[in-house]
Image (spheres, rainbow, N blue to C red):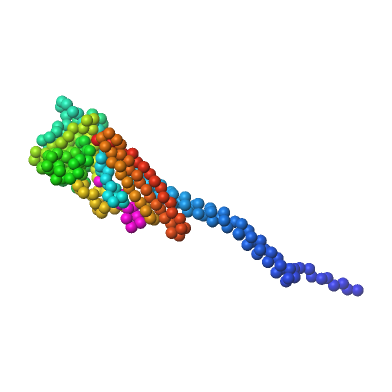
Amino acid sequence: MSSCKRAHGFTLIELIIVMILVGVLSGTLFMILRGPMESIAANEGRARLVDIAETALQRMTREIRLALPYSIRVSGANAMEFLRIVDGGRYRAKGAGRLKFNTVNNDTFTSLSTLANAGAIATGAGSAACINSTADCVVVYNIGQPLSVASATVSGSSANAYLGSSAAYDGNIATISAVAANSVSYDNSDLAGWGFAFKSPRQRFHVVDTPVSFVCSGGEIHRFAGYAITPAQSVTPGGADNLLVDQVSACSFTLRAPTLTRAGLLTLSLTINDATLGQSVTLLQQVHLDNVP
């Protein structure tokens, strides 16, 4: 007598039931995990935006801390400018090697401290070299006054480096013609009768190399440097143009100017937006400004 062996396996109905159950379980699991996964992606996107904004603010802050006292100025809350210090020290006030004032338009004076960056200071001849940023400048007692060339011409003197140098008035900025570890030579000899106008109470001098501007426009912040020093601030200064950050939906530079009795405060506000994520972050940074010219 022969026996028949039945084939064992899944029927079509059983397979369909299993597929339906797997689909239901997968859908349920997806709904459970969807929220945490979206939250993780949103947090990662937000962290990236925070990192972009923080990096830009830190970069600006580092350079602002190199600003010549009383040289920071703001235009329309979206453009900021300052003169950048590369070195400085205290000058000799008496005896040989002293810094002379009023009608000495080219000379050499002694620095009481060693210049740390003497080898990197650019030199030139004539007052225009400093103003055009082809040579570095020496500045003495910058308090940002008066505010205009006309006022300086009337008073006969200027303690505002942005006004430059002129035969019409004594000023506080001159072209560096030579430099050593403990001495600085300057040359404004093209200006008859020119001289440094005011003595620094602390015998301080600064060496500046270029104006620097940060301009927020068109969803970007650009850094400009290597352009001419001008009495009036420009929101399109020229020179070397470098993109600092994009994706900017809002920015603000607010200045509480320093005085001789109070330090200044510069407030930087920056909003970075990512349209694809539908997210934005706003960071605020405050920088205290030196008031010792």
Q: Residue at x 31, y 50 (%)?
A: 77
In-front residue for pair 225/216:
216
- Across and down, in percent, residue 281 comes to 43, 51
- Across and down, in percent, residue 124 comes to 17, 43
Q: Determine if the magenta segment contains residue 215.
A: yes
Horizontally, residue 226 falls left or right of residue 53, namely left
Residue 179 vs 236, above or below: the answer is above
- Across and down, in percent, residue 230 comes to 20, 48
Magenta span: 211-221
Horizontally, residue 278 falls left or right of residue 79, namely right
- Across and down, in percent, residue 18 comes to 70, 65
Question: Which image quarter is the C terminus in?
Answer: top left
Q: Is residue 27 visible?
A: yes
Question: Which image quarter is the N terminus in?
Answer: bottom right
**What secondary structure prevails in the magenta region?**
strand
Q: Residue at x 41, y 50 (%)?
A: 282
Q: Residue at x 44, y 49 (%)?
A: 50
